[in-house]
Image (cartoon, rainbow, N blue to C red):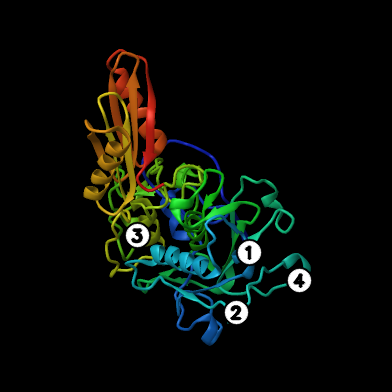
Amino acid sequence: MILRRLALSLLALMGLTGFVVEGPRGGGTDARDHLDRAPRWSMTQGSLIETGERGIGGGIEYAIDDSLCKMGFIDNATCEDIHTSLAEVLEEWSSGHPSLYFTDVTGQVEPSVPLAVIGQSHQGAEIDFFGQTGREFPPFRNIRTTGYTLFYERPEAGPVLLPNGEPAEHAIRIESADVRVNASRCFYIDTTQGRPDCLHFPSIMLHEVGHALGFGHPEESPRYNLDTDARPVTQMQIDCVKPSRTLKHSPFYDGASVMVGRDVQGPGRWRRGLTPDDVGARDALYPHCDIRPKPRFTGQWGAFAITTNGLEGRARFEASEADARANALEQCKVSNGDGCEIVTSFSSCFAYATGTNGAAAHAQSPRSDYARANAVLACAKSGEECRVTADFCAFE
């Protein structure tokens, strides 16, 4: 049994689009060969609970350790809330896929970490979830390491069977994974009660589950990034029989991708769900010809209103564009009286920049840093010195 380590990185690189898988050790330089040989879960006839088989059969079976419910949640989330939130994260990864799904076996299988160095081999469920401190798990002594996923490979188990029915002759079988969250941090589920020093629990789990499925950080392995075109935010057209046939190397990546391992403490760029890069990675590693297209994000809307003297109104977390615009105007009028006008509405991140002599410009982007930079650049075209005076995301 081989252990593969996948730490949550905090690197920051710029890019456009593409995904990367956790390829084989000693793999070649060809990105498509990297995909063909990558570790992944195999289709099985039975399940862990029913037949003792580890794989996708019966759903990838997961168990939640009690330690996850004992972490510090500032919104007073209950253990039931945590279980529900994690189930929703797993549904996000499986939505639209006819074979890839997850089954909760908490209470039926005890979560366990195999410690080969002391001869312990019990692996618990197929994916186990834990909350641990730096004393229990040394990588968490670095407080900025918020999540850490380990998966275990079984190279000698024979060809991996893909969901499309084809064997992946050179791929390696994943048979279990452990997902840890740094219990020394504070967390929340309710986005209206978040704090900058605490972490959005579903966002962390959305990223870590991607690792447990076999996906890596695209910003760390640009030579292995894959895409079907060079356009960001477009759905990838994956060949459902042989995915590598329609994919090509792309050194870029979407900065809003769930699998980009950075900025987990910043604005909630993962809260809208999987990007096309994330969905493309899933459909390439687990191809099936009956996959239903998945919308890019579970949209939330924001809006920004302002008066002639610079006073403002903001709205976010809204279910529709009309609600966002109405609430931004209402906030502006309640605080500042009449004369409010909507600058724009958006379902991404927004920034508003003003100049020293009255110039103003705004920009939108899936990433808050891009929105800020673009707003300043647009304002500076007036020849004035500009700075950002308002920025926020619809979903943070």
Does the image show residue 15?
no
Q: Looking at the picture, tell me which residue is in the foreground, 396 or 378.
A: 396
Residue 366: image x %, image y %?
Answer: 35, 42
Q: Give the label on residue 109, or none.
A: 2
Residue 349: image x %, image y %?
Answer: 35, 40
C-alpha distance separating marks 3 and 4: 39 Å
C-alpha distance separating marks 4 and 2: 20 Å
Residue named by callout 1: 70
Q: Please identify, in this view, whether the residue under mark 3 or under mark 2 is nearer the observer.
A: 2
* SS for dot 2: loop
Q: Amino acid at mark 1?
A: Lys
Residue named by callout 4: 119
Q: Looking at the picture, tell me which residue is in the foreground, 179 or 270.
A: 270
Using the rendered view, name the quadrant where residue 314 is placed: top left
Residue 300: image x %, image y %?
Answer: 32, 51
Q: Please identify, in this view, whether the residue under mark 1 or under mark 2 is nearer the observer.
A: 1
C-alpha distance separating marks 1 and 4: 29 Å
Q: Give the label on residue 243, or none.
A: 3
Q: Earlier in the sequence, mark 3 or mark 1?
A: 1
Q: Residue at x 50, y 81 (%)?
A: 47
Q: Earlier in the sequence, mark 3 or mark 4?
A: 4
Q: Earlier in the sequence, mark 1 or mark 2?
A: 1
Q: How many marks?
A: 4
C-alpha distance separating marks 3 and 1: 42 Å
Q: Amino acid at mark 3?
A: Pro
